[in-house]
Image: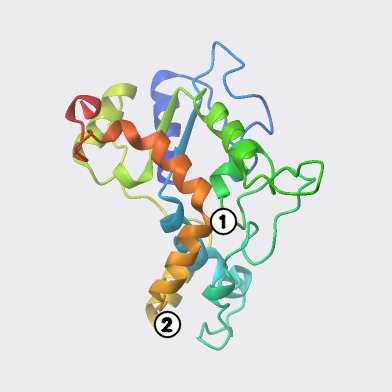
Amino acid sequence: IMIRNYLHTVSSHHKLHLRMEEYNHASSVEEVGSRDDTLYITNIRDPVERSISHFKYLGRWDCDQLTKNESYVASEENARSFRRWRETGGFERSPCDVPFSMVDCAVNCYVQTFSGRGCPVEDGDGNANNWYDEYNAALDRLLRYDMILVYDKFKDPNYVRAVERFFGVEGFNNKTIDMYCGWESRMANERVPLKVKFQHVLELTHLNEMDNRLYRDLTSCWTTKEGGRNEEEVE
C-alpha cells in the first residue's frame, strides 16, 4: 500500500496516468516493456520473509472472520498450521492451467508471478524440470522492467533518497494505512505470537530455492564482491 500511495503521488505531481496491477500474473493486461511511452515498475522482497509475512497476515486466520465476525476470537486452536504453509498455492498446489495469482502463495511466488505458471513444465516422460523454464521466463520478464523496488532496502535512507531523486517527489517511505485485514491480523498475532521452528524455516527456504536464486540475481547489484554495499549503485 505504501508503494501504491507513493506512485499515486508521483503520477499526480507529474500529471501522468497510473495503472496498478496487483496480485496477478505480471503480463495479465499487457506484456512488460511492450510500450515505449510507459514506465514499468514492480517490487520484490526476500522470498522466505515474504512467505512468512504472508502467512502471518493473510494465511494464519480467516481474514473475513477477523474483519466481519465480531464474535470471532483468534486463538491457537483456530489458527492454521504454519507447517502446512509449504505449497505453491499456500496450503495447496497452484493450478497449472490458469494464470497465477499471488493472493495465496508460499513457495516460488515470484517465479510463478513473473512466468505466469503455477507449476513447472514436464518433459515428454512426465518429469518436472525443477522450475528452470519458469525461472528463465520470470527473469527475462523482470529484466524488462524499468524499475524494481526492493522492499528489504526501504529502511535504508540512502535507498529512499535515491528513489525520491529518481521520481523528483519526496515521501517514498511515509507511513500509510493498513492493507485489508492488516490491523486485525496484527492484533491477532500480538495476542497469539507465531512460534516458528528453525527446521520449518529451513524447509521453506529449500522449497523456495528458485525464488531465492531469482532474488539474489536481481539484487546482486547492491553488494560488492566482498559482500558489502555498493555505494555507487545507491547514489
Q: Is residue 71 above or below residue 39?
A: below
Image x and y of residue 130, in percent: 62, 47
How would you rate the neighbour count of disc 2 (Cα within 10 Å): few for under 14, some for 14-19, many for 20 or more? Answer: few
Image x and y of residue 79, in percent: 55, 80
Residue pointed to by mark 1 = 107
At 47% across and 40% down in the image, what residue appears?
Answer: 214
Q: Amino acid at mark 1?
A: Val
Q: In this orientation, which residue lies closer to the viewer: 141 or 5?
A: 141
Q: Residue furthest front?
A: 125
Q: Specify whether residue 235 is in view.
A: yes
Q: Is residue 202 above or below residue 79?
A: above
In terms of sequence position, does the residue under pointer 1 or pointer 2 come before the other?
A: 1
Q: In this orientation, which residue lies closer to the viewer: 13 or 137?
A: 137
Residue pointed to by mark 2 = 192
Q: Is residue 74 above or below residue 15?
A: below
Image x and y of residue 77, in percent: 55, 89
Q: Is residue 231 above or below residue 57?
A: above
Q: Residue furthest bottom?
A: 77
Q: Specify whether residue 6 is in view.
A: no
Quadrant position of residue 48: bottom left
Q: Are marks 1 and 2 in contact (CB under 8 Å)?
A: no
Q: Residue furthest top?
A: 36
Image x and y of residue 95, in percent: 75, 53
Q: In the structure shown, which secondary structural element does the residue marked by tag 1 occupy?
A: loop
Q: Amino acid at mark 2?
A: Val
The answer for how far apart the CA atoms under marks 1 and 2 are is 24 Å
Q: In the structure shown, which secondary structural element does the residue marked by tag 2 occupy?
A: loop
